[in-house]
Amino acid sequence: MKIILASKSEVRKKILNQNSIRCEVVPANIDEELIKNSLLKEKASPELISKNLAELKANKVSEKRHNHLVLGADSVIDLNGELISKPTNRDEAFAILKKLNGQKHQLISSGEAFSLSKEFLISSSSIFAGTTSHLILF
């Protein structure tokens, strides 16, 4: 069975390839920010937001790839109840790193596999070690 990764993430593809799992990349092209904002208005937890995004990605791609195993994945950061989204540029990335600096936060990753009807949720807690703004620039 052919494996499809419903993600634009080069890191996810690299992880699969390093584990001898060959896949085709077919991005789902969903509006993640729209979905996140809608779920946040409904007071959804970060875990639920991550799971829903992963499921939507896998489901959308699987609609066109019926006989394939489609993997959808998403990760979000929960900083004391605040959902941190992916930065869109270097300045946003720097601001996020400064905000996380020395703060306990959760990286929540979810994955969905369609065709085999398997799903999983991975949640980990991490602490961003203190550093200086100068070091973040490099």
Image (cartoon, rainbow, N blue to C red):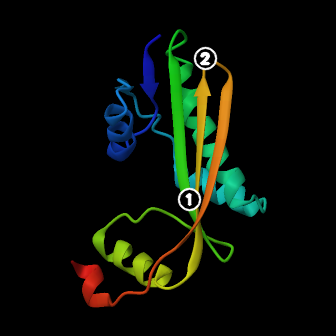
Amino acid type at mark 2: Ser
Dot placed on the residue nearer the N-terminal end, 2 or 1: 1
**Does 121 sit above or below residue 86?**
above
Q: Which residue is mark 2?
A: 115
Helix, strand or loop at label 1? It is strand
| Neighbour tally class for label 2: few under 14, some 14-19, many 20 plus, Cα within 10 Å | some
**Does 20 sit above or below residue 128?**
above
Quarter of image, res 118: top right
| Number of dots carrying numbers | 2
Q: Is 34 displayed left or right of 134 in the figure?
A: right
> Residue 122 at what x, y percent from top left?
62, 48
Q: Which residue is mark 1?
A: 76
Helix, strand or loop at label 2? It is loop
**Does 85 sit above or below residue 52?**
below
CA separation in Å, label 2 and label 1:
25 Å
124 and 86: which is toward the camera: 124
Q: Is residue 61 visible?
A: no
| Neighbour tally class for label 1: few under 14, some 14-19, many 20 plus, Cα within 10 Å | many
**Does 60 sit above or below residue 102?**
above
Quarter of image, res 133: bottom left
Quarter holding the C terminus? Answer: bottom left
